[in-house]
Amino acid sequence: MQTEKVRVRFAPSPTGPLHMGGVRTALFNYLFAKKHNGTFVLRIEDTDMRRFVPGAEQYIIEALNWCGITPDEGVLPSGSIATEPCSRHPFAPYRQSERKAIYGQYAKQLVSQGDAYYAFDTPAELESYRLEAEIRGETFTYNHLVRNKTANSLNMTAAEVARRIKETNDWVIRFKVPEDQMILMNDMIRGNISVQSGTLDDKVLWKAHDGLPTYHLANIVDDCLMQITHVIRGEEWLPSLPLHYMLYNAFGWQEKRPLFAHLPLLLKPDGKGKLSKRDGDRLGFPVFPLEWTSSSGERSRGYREDGYYPEAFVNLIALLGWNPGTEQEIFSLEELTEAFSMDRVIKSGARFNPEKARWFNQQYLRNRSDARLAQDFLVLLQKKGIATTLQKAEKIVSLIKQRASFVHEFWDLSHYFFIPPTNYDPVYSKKSWKPETPGIIRQAKEILEGCTSFNVTSIEKTLHLWIEKEQLKTGQVMNALRLCIVGEPQGPGIAEIMDVLGREETLARLDRALNNL
RNA sequence: GGCCAGUUCGUCUAACGGUUAGGACUCAAGAUUUUCAUUCUUGCAAUAGGGGUUCGAUUCCCCUACUGGCUACCA
């Protein structure tokens, strides 16, 4: 076990918006770091220039920021990636494209040690190997059998190699996987894993043309240089773990090799496979923390724009693949940090459930103070062109909040406070508007006019006294009043609504209903 | 196809050899209520299959099935 300070990193590629699985990986890294008083580093792995997407890096930073899982190292206060070393960011730059100069020597070291080699296969040649294998019903694996037959630095003189490198651009550096070696690995979540090296292929470490290493080389070199102690990443990386172990061994870095934890994947709510961008559109829920518009103008919705609280979002993704072992389900980021432990991470993939996501937000909405909700409500009302006071907004919020999961639902739940009903729910009318009802409403009007102070308790008291005296049915009267005032069978207690509306508006609505029904 | 990992209610999960297999979401029923909702109560619903090991397997081992990932000069 490491005795030095815990250092973890989240190392996304800027190939598009980070999806919720990526955020979860970042979150677990963050939680692990905080739990152990360690450092959470953000590093941008942009070694594939063809897949680079402008704006993706900024999106990643903004998304993490929205979630409150901000990196300790790698990102400047301005929100940009640190490019110059300083006390806070000692290993800058943190963008791999800016670290180009570093990787070359390590690739060359492996070649000169005999752990890697120059391979001169053209793309066309590789393609034909694949085709041949396919005809035999196999998948082409670039292994020791292949490297013995192809043109590479293993089977030519140094002079020939030098000549080839000079003359062509079609060369890569491949890792030379031992022919027959049992690779023993350990994962913090899965325990011991072993694999025969003979089943592995000679992965490309250095690409032709763009002068950049592949993920594998850059990742190992940077993790070592940046003194990363724990690599927490998605399960899709598990098949690369043997290569990464071999790389650490080849460099003689086995002492510095971090501990690995491969997180279970997030799966589609239905059907097969891991959660993808498309599922959101198809099933009607966001897969991204923030809204994203692609260069082609295609828009993907975000949790933020859908009205989720970042706390709720973080809470719900934290419980996908991890649980505290208690029955607690609602956790602040601080509580998560306290409760998190890697040995309670689940091994199997977690199917995402959008309904439970809603429920989480509902919990957070309920726990918000009326004052805070009223602020948001006011903004929403403003967009509808409705002016009201903070006091009134707060009062209405307190009456409707337990019916909502999102703030944007407030309007549907409260419009009748601001706009009198123009049409009356037909089913409800049929049920509550009887021949004798107009008479009752007229009487109710008089009663309400005479009600000394127009507040909830006095309205209720007055109404009930009258109902009792006249031997009316409570339900009959209340439903009729609700029909007149709200127009539909929904909402809080009718006295509460009258209280908010005020005497004048209440009576006006009764008159209106009398004329229209 | 090959390699690796996984498999408890529909979903998220608890139980790290001994429980009537627990909780949450969803759904259903009931109670409360002037409507809707809330709240409360109850209910439906699971150890993939087959072999072992053991006094006893959800739990340990093996096989099969299924699921997922990977199999690029992508990460």
Image (cartoon, rainbow, N blue to C red):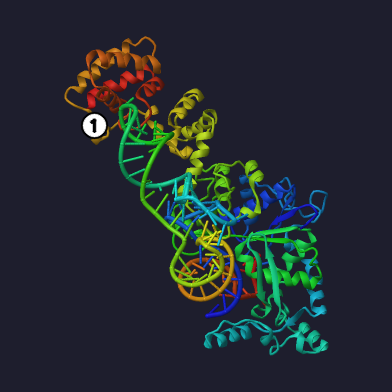
Mark 1 surroundings within 10 Å by alpha-carbon count, few (fewer than 14), some (14 through 19), many (20 or more) = some
Chain letter for mark 1: A
Q: Position of residue A201 (x, y in %)?
A: 66, 78
Q: Residue at x 47, y 27 (%)?
A: A393
Quarter of the image that includes the N terminus of chain A: bottom right
Closest to the observer: A176 or A471? A471
Closest to the observer: B44 or A399? B44
Q: How many marks?
A: 1
Task: List the residue tagged with mark 1.
Answer: A429
Q: Residue at x 82, y 51 (%)?
A: A86
| In the image, residue A42 above or below residue A113 | above
Q: Find numbered disc 1 in the image and state the secondary structure of the residue it sits on.
A: helix
Closest to the observer: A272 or A71? A272
Residue A338, picture quadrant: top right
Q: Position of residue A152 (x, y in %)?
A: 73, 86
Q: Is residue A178 left or right of residue A360?
A: right
Which three-letter amino acid code belongs to the residue tagged 1? Ser
Residue A241, picture quadrant: bottom right
Q: Residue at x 39, y 20 (%)?
A: A499
Q: Residue A484, can we see it?
A: yes
Q: Position of residue A109 (x, y in %)?
A: 82, 74
Q: Position of residue A237 (x, y in %)?
A: 63, 66
Residue A239, picture quadrant: bottom right
